[in-house]
């Protein structure tokens, strides 16, 4: 299941999944897990003791943006999806105070890359019952 996110005057769809791992590695030559870990450079215990602005200063925006690129490419059916440099250059601006974007990218990574078989089955059962 994909989600819609907003950043820098753009609205786009992201979807994390196994294909995201491939796209990320092909474009950046590294593991998506490295950027995921860097994106939230603090533990929940440490976060509870810090202000919102202190936490924002710790977020790794380049990692979040690289993840968003891979997730948008995964959600896209466009064979001419832009390379990283073209994708990031299309933004006129970004709001580095946009905590919601960081959270949505992190949640999408968790949803698409860290689900057990049981969690996926339960999600499918909930979808079928509605």
Image (cartoon, rainbow, N blue to C red):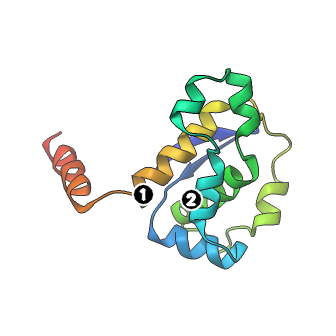
Q: Which disc, if any, is residue 125?
A: none
Q: Mark 1 near mark 2, Cβ–Cβ under 8 Å?
A: yes
Of marks 1 and 2, the one in the foreground = 1
Q: Quadrant of the C terminus?
A: top left
* Residue at image location 53% in from the left, 67% down from the top: 20
Q: Earlier in the sequence, mark 1 or mark 2?
A: 2
Asked whether, in this view, residue 92 is left or right of residue 99, the answer is right
Comparing 92 with 106, the one in front is: 106
- Against 33, is 65 above or below? above
Q: Which disc, if any, is residue 112?
A: 1
* Residue at image location 67% in from the left, 68% down from the top: 81
Residue 82 position in % (x across, y down):
73, 67
Comparing 81 with 38, the one in front is: 38
Badge 2, how many Cα within 10 Å: few under 14, some, many 20+?
many
Asked whether, in this view, residue 37 is left or right of residue 54, the answer is left
Residue 91 position in % (x across, y down):
81, 47
Asked whether, in this view, residue 102 is left or right of residue 45, the answer is right
Residue 111 position in % (x across, y down):
40, 51
Q: Is residue 9 visible?
A: no
Q: Which type of secondary structure does the marked residue at label 1 adopt?
A: helix
- When asked about the image quadrant of residue 69, the answer is bottom right
- Against 112, is 97 above or below? above
Residue 34 position in % (x across, y down):
62, 63
Comparing 92 with 20, the one in front is: 20
Q: Is residue 130 visible?
A: yes
* Residue at image location 24% in from the left, 49% down from the top: 123
Instruction: Determine which residue is flagged by label 2.
Output: 71
Q: CA distance from mark 1 to mark 2?
A: 10 Å
Badge 1, how many Cα within 10 Å: few under 14, some, many 20+?
some
Q: Which type of secondary structure does the marked residue at label 2 adopt?
A: helix
């Amino acid at each position: 299941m994909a989600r819609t996110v907003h950043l820098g005057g753009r609205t786009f769809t992201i979807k994390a999944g196994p294909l995201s791992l491939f796209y990320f590695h092909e474009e950046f030559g590294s593991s998506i897990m490295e950027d995921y870990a860097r994106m939230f450079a603090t533990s929940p215990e440490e976060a509870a003791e810090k202000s919102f602005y202190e936490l924002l200063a710790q977020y790794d925006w380049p990692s979040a943006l690289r993840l968003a690129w891979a997730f948008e490419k995964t959600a896209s059916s466009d064979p001419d999806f832009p390379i990283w440099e073209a994708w990031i250059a299309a933004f006129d601006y970004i709001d580095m105070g946009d905590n919601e974007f960081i959270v949505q990218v992190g949640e999408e990574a968790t949803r698409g890359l860290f689900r057990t078989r049981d969690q996926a089955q339960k999600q499918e059962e909930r979808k079928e019952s509605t």
